[in-house]
Amino acid sequence: VRLLEVRLLAEYFEVLTATNGLDAIETCENGKVDVVLLDVMMPDMDGFEVCRRLKSDPATSHIPVVMITALDQV
C-alpha cells in the first residue's frame, strides 16, 4: 500500500491514508473520496469487513473499492 501511495503522490493525486479499518471508514464518511485502495490485511478489522461496511452504508456505498494484498493466496 505504501508503494501505491508514493506512486499516486508522484502523479499529483491527493492521497488520504488510514492506519486501521475504523479510521478508513471514518475518512470515507467525512471526506470526498473518489476511490478506496483497501489492503486485505489490516489491524483490528480486515479489509473484507471494511468493504462490507462501506458498501452497506448509503453514504459510502457509491465509492469504488479496490482490494489489494501481498498474500499469494486469498
Image (spheres, grey):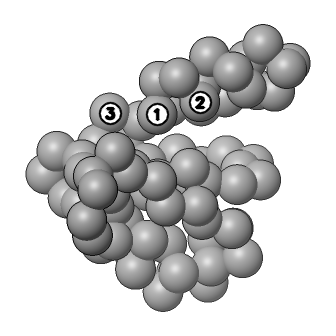
Q: Looking at the picture, which amino acid does disc 2 mark? A: Leu
User: In the figure, 16 relative to 20: above or below?
Assistant: above
Neighbour tally class for label 2: few under 14, some 14-19, many 20 plus, Cα within 10 Å? few
Q: What residue is disc 3 on?
A: 19
In the picture, the disc for residue 28 is: none
Q: Measure the C-alpha gap from mark 1 to mark 3.
A: 11 Å
In the picture, the disc for residue 1 is: 1
Q: What residue is disc 2 on?
A: 4
Q: Which residue is drawn at 47% across and 24% down?
A: 2
Evaluate if marks 1 and 2 touch, with contact meaning CB atoms under 8 Å apart. yes
**Image-quadrant location for residue 9:** top right
Q: Residue at x 69, y 67 (%)?
A: 63
Left or right for 31, reference 47: right
Q: What element carries label 3?
A: loop
Q: Which of marks 3 and 2 is in front?
A: 2
Badge 1 or badge 3: first in the primary sequence: 1
Name the residue nearer the viewer: 1 or 31.
1
Q: Looking at the picture, which amino acid does disc 3 mark? A: Thr
Q: Looking at the picture, which amino acid does disc 1 mark? A: Val
Badge 3 or badge 2: first in the primary sequence: 2
Q: Which residue is drawn at 27% across and 70% down?
A: 74
Q: Which residue is drawn at 40% across and 80% down?
A: 52
Whole-percent x and y of residue 60? Answer: 61, 71
